[in-house]
Structures are given as C-alpha cells and as structure tokens.
C-alpha cells in the first residue's frame, strides 16, 4: 500500500525539532533472525538501498533532533551520500511493521471501538 500526499504542503516547523519527509510503501524482505542482533550484511540489505517511492509522495513527520542527526550521519557515511533520509526512514518502518505486525493487529483490535 502506498500512501500519497494529495496536497502540496510546505514543511512546518514547530519550534525545536526537524521535519522529515516520510513515505509509506510495502516490501517483504527476509527479516533479521528473531532475538538476534542485526549483522552488517542484513543491515545494508534491509536499510541502505534506494526507496521504492519518491519522497515527494510522502507526508511530513517530526523527527527528534538527535535522531535526525544520527540518521543523516548514517545515510552520509554508510549510504555514501546516495541514500536519502526519507528512504532510510521508510526502510526502518517497513522492517518494524514486518517484525511487529501481529502484535500491532492484536492491540489494534483490542483498542478499536466500532462506530456502529
């Protein structure tokens, strides 16, 4: 599923943090072993690669300054200045949703109140 921003919006600053363009796309990759640490090859395969959707099709989201700095350093050094902040965040979120899908679905069902 790809979520697109239908309006042309300007970034808004709320006083202290950085804004990042966030995009949504779905791609199934073999996950890092459960309970295991992420190795170098897994990390590069999962996160250091081109985005499937261009950043301009995403939505804006706040990223705390220390994470923004950390992500920018990762994308510059490991991504050799060819990986965007948006692409990296998209890959991290895709991995998170793949790893936590069942828990999210269960919690959502427990907390969802139907309108009718």
Image: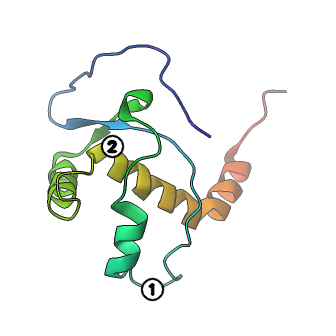
32 vs 108, nearest the viewer: 32
Image x and y of residue 83, in percent: 27, 51
Assess whether mark 1 and mark 2 are in contact (beta carbons under 8 angstroms).
no
Q: Quadrant of the N terminus?
A: top right
- The residue at 49%/84% (across/down) is 35
Foreground residue among 75 and 38: 75
Q: Is residue 75 above or below residue 41?
A: above
CA gap between label 2 and label 1 equals 26 Å
Location of residue 61 in the rendering, given as x and y in whole percent from the top left corner:
35, 35
Q: Is residue 29 above or below residue 86?
A: below
Q: Nearer the viewer, mark 2 or mark 1?
A: 2
Residue at the spot 42% in from the left edge and 49% down from the top edge: 90
Q: Is residue 44 left or right of residue 13?
A: right
Q: In this orientation, which residue lies closer to the viewer: 102 or 22?
A: 22
Say which quadrant the C terminus sits in: top right
The residue at 37%/51% (across/down) is: 50
Category of crowding for the residue at label 2, using alpha-carbon neighbours closer than 10 angstroms: few (below 14), some (14–19), many (at least 20): many
Q: What residue is shown with label 1?
A: 36
In the shown orientation, is residue 3 left or right of residue 84? right
**Of pointers 2 and 1, the one earlier in the residue sequence:** 1
Q: Quadrant of residue 16?
A: top left
Position above or below: 41 against 14: below
Q: Circle 1: is it few (<14), some (14-19), or many (20+) Cα within 10 Å?
A: few
Q: Which residue is drawn at the image coordinates 43% and 32% (left, top)?
A: 58
The structure's colour scheme is rainbow
Q: Residue furthest right?
A: 116
Q: Where does residue 71 sit, x and y in percent of width and height?
A: 22, 55
Q: Which label belongs to residue 74? A: none
Residue corresponding to mark 2: 86
Tell me where residue 114 appears, x and y as whole percent: 79, 34
């Amino acid at each position: 599923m790809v979520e697109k921003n239908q309006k042309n919006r300007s970034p808004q600053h709320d006083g202290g943090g950085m804004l990042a363009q966030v995009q949504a796309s779905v791609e199934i990759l073999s996950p890092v072993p459960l309970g295991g640490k992420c190795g170098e090859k897994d990390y590069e395969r999962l996160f250091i690669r081109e985005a499937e959707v261009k950043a301009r099709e995403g939505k804006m989201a706040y990223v705390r300054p220390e994470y923004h700095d950390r992500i920018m350093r990762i994308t510059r050094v490991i991504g050799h200045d060819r990986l965007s902040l948006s692409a990296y965040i998209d890959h991290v979120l895709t991995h998170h949703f793949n790893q936590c899908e069942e828990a999210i679905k269960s919690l959502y069902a427990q907390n969802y109140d139907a309108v009718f």
